[in-house]
Amino acid sequence: MSTDPVTLMVARRVACGRYRAFSDWLDEGRRLAADFDGFLGSGVLAPPPGDDEYQIIFRFSDESTLVVWEHSASRHAWLARGRGLFEAPHEHRASGLGNWFHDAVGNGPPRWKQATAIWLAFFPVSLMFQWLFGEALETLPLVLRILASTLMLTPLMVFFFIPLITRLLAPWLQGRPPISGGQGRLPHLRRA
């Protein structure tokens, strides 16, 4: 098993009219996962207007800690409590940053497109960070300034901005025409 951090991305389509119960159920699952060794964080990407498929992200320190959580009694009980709240779940596991851009069969955009997408996410976040905290941190030595910024920005990038940018740029990244009707999805979570 890999010792790199592993991200489990799950797409779940909300059952008709069950948004509030689904949201509460998601929050419960994220709290449960946080109790497990190796848990690094989680996030939820809401669907674009006109869609009802949420992207849920769980990140663990390595494959073995993710497997322990996946096969735990508490997770199975949580999934059982969610029956009727969602339809058609799809899961994708990724380790390493490049896998954010690959589909279920391993196809991905050229590296220059990946680099461009990461830059498009990282530049405005870094700019905002410097604008908000730059003066407060300027008296610190360089190493401590960089440590503080990377500790704050890395989770934001991994759990929110990189998934968001891959979702927004999916047609360009994958070289396919835009999906009409607001049905955009992360490129690596495809309908079976």
Image (cartoon, rainbow, N blue to C red):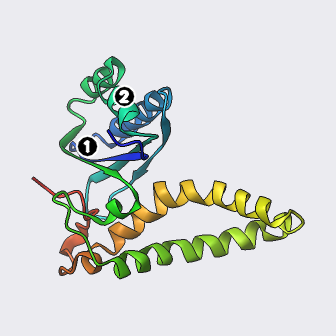
Instruction: Return the residue nearer the eye: 51 or 176.
Output: 176
Few, some or many residues within 10 Å of mark 2 (<14, 14–19, 20+): many
Q: Residue furthest right?
A: 139
Q: Is residue 74 left or right of residue 53?
A: right
Judged from the image, the secondary structure of the residue bearing numbered disc 2 is helix
Please report the residue visible at 36 percent of the width from the left and 32 percent of the height from the top: 64
Q: Residue at position x 26%, y 54% from top?
A: 52
**Mark 1 or 2, nearer chain start:** 1
Residue that sits furthest to the top in the current view = 73
Amino acid identity at mark 2: Trp
Task: Classify residue 60 by image quadrant.
Answer: top left
Using the rendered view, name the quadrant where residue 179 is placed: bottom left
Q: Which mark is residue 69?
A: 2
Provide the residue designation for mark 1: 17
- Decide which of 91, 2 is in the foreground and name it: 2
Residue 93 is situated, as x and y percent measured from the top left of the image, at 29, 47
Q: Which residue is depicted at the point 28% across and 81% down?
A: 172
- Mark 1–mark 2 Cα distance, whole angstroms, equals 29 Å
**Other-residue count near label 1 (Cα within 10 Å), few / some / many at <14 / 14–19 / ≥20:** few
